[in-house]
Amino acid sequence: MDEKPKASEKIVKAFILEDGRVIEEKELEKYRTKKAELSEEELKSHQLFEADMKVLYSTGQIIDPPYNLTYLDSMLEKNTEHGACVKQKAVDVCGLGYRLKTPKHLKSIEEASQENFNILKTFFDFTNPEETLEEVCTKLWVDYEGNGNGCLEIVEKEKRPIAIYHMSSATVRRTKNPNVYVQVRDQKKRFFLRYGSITPDVDKKWIEEKFINVKDKELFSDHKILHIINYTPKSSWYGLPDWLPSLSAILGNIQNSDYNLDFFENNAIPHYAVIIKGADLDPDVESVIKTFFSQEIRGHSHKTLVVAVDDKEVEVVFEKLAVEIKDASFRMYRQDNRDEIIRAHRVPFSRINVSIPGKLGGGGVALEETETYKKSIIRPKQKILEHRFNQFIINRGFGIKDWTFEFERLDPTDEETDMKTHTTYVKAGVKSINEVRKDLDLAPTEGGEYPFVNTSIGLMYIKDLPKSSDMETTMQSLNQEMFGKYMEDFKKELLGIFTKEKESELSLKKIAQKAIGLILRKKI
């Protein structure tokens, strides 16, 4: 049978909190900050939106996205770097304006209809009564980068588009009919058809057959949805965002912030430990300690606490604790998460004003990173939305084939790069002057329709160059002709020296010196 510990061997630890409370060590666990993981309750709160769709899901015709789209969107508000990257990419893709250009199959801008240009210009300049095209498209792309899906509502009149609105993709669900979408918001639902559907009557009938009470006109909209998805192998119906692999880093930084916030709000980390050797924590002693730390010591940091103990074997020790929050480790952890998030977005650090201490390279490296970002990230994304506008709105909606839509490039330095590229193409004979002028939306110039190259005998149109089998003979003939003309001119000039010097009655030696100088200059 185990013996009871002697009074002098018994040790009880208690802690004084910032608010003066005194707690024993065994009770400290409930004051510790929560672990860096999501609770079931928190996850469930993000699924409340789905409850509005319960009836629709029960039909078996609604397709669930691979991730909760509302939950993915909520990450924009919870992480600084993630939100900054999404907003920056949206602005870089859609927020810099647009221009209308003639397609490549037209030889000159004069072949394009000015009336068609005015129709498209009016439509894109007045996208809807409330917003500009840049605002609508930027919202679309925030959704696309945030949850992998972007939706536009296309308003039509007489089968021609008259307005475009942004539609929150988190509120939209696909159905087993690829041409039918349903939007649910505030417990209200409405069905839309896919923009470009060639079987609208069949699709409407399908909605009426599969869903109850859909014959109500308020449940069906004549407006159409244009849906853009960021491809994922997990779903053929929905997209997922590029940043998803960094979700754990985002959650880690969220929990990091919550940890620090709890520390400052709850003051749950003790600064002193009370160690009592040889006795239990007496209620009277606890009351004295609590009163002292909660009232007496506030504003008087050098006051002294006296604890009277009758038993000589009992020892009371106050020990100041170091706050064991490893600030450096947390900073490194947070920084590593930040870097992972930004890299998942493939955005240059300088683009969102994030500097990396100790990084070498200077402005040249940043410029190179930005150029790569423009060409490999932003420009391909611009082409995705440009294709939808050109194919669906301009070609199918308006029936216009002689104008195309294009977003403005990221910055003016692209014009300088394009100028150098065009110049190189012209000099190498890859493009004619008029082809370059067409790319720049300029009128053609006379004589600029053929590409040319610079040869040893001057500029020649490529169409006039001799065939490869005749090239050597042609060049030999041209060289002989040029050499003969060259020698003829030399003889005339040399004869002129002798004639001129003879009339001047110079010595034969002077005449010879003049002739030798001419020969050396001519390199005969």
Image: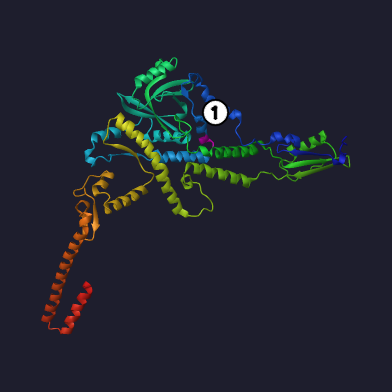
Residue 86: percent from left, percent from top: 47, 38
271 over 391 or under it: above or below: below
Quarter holding the C terminus is bottom left
Residue at 22% from the left image edge and 39% from the top image edge: 111
Question: In this orientation, which residue lies closer to the viewer: 192 or 269?
Answer: 192
Q: Which residue is mark 1?
A: 46
**Residue 398 appears in which quarter of the rendering?**
top left
Q: Is residue 253 magenta?
A: no
Residue at 75% from the left image edge and 37% from the top image edge: 25
Question: In this orientation, which residue lies closer to the viewer: 107 or 275?
Answer: 107
Neighbour class for label 1 at 10 Å: few (<14), some, many (≥20)? some
Residue 133 appears in the picture as rendered: yes
Examine the residues drawn in magenta and state their main secondary structure.
Answer: helix
Quarter holding the N terminus is top right
Residue 309: percent from left, percent from top: 86, 40
Q: Which residues are magenta?
A: 75-79
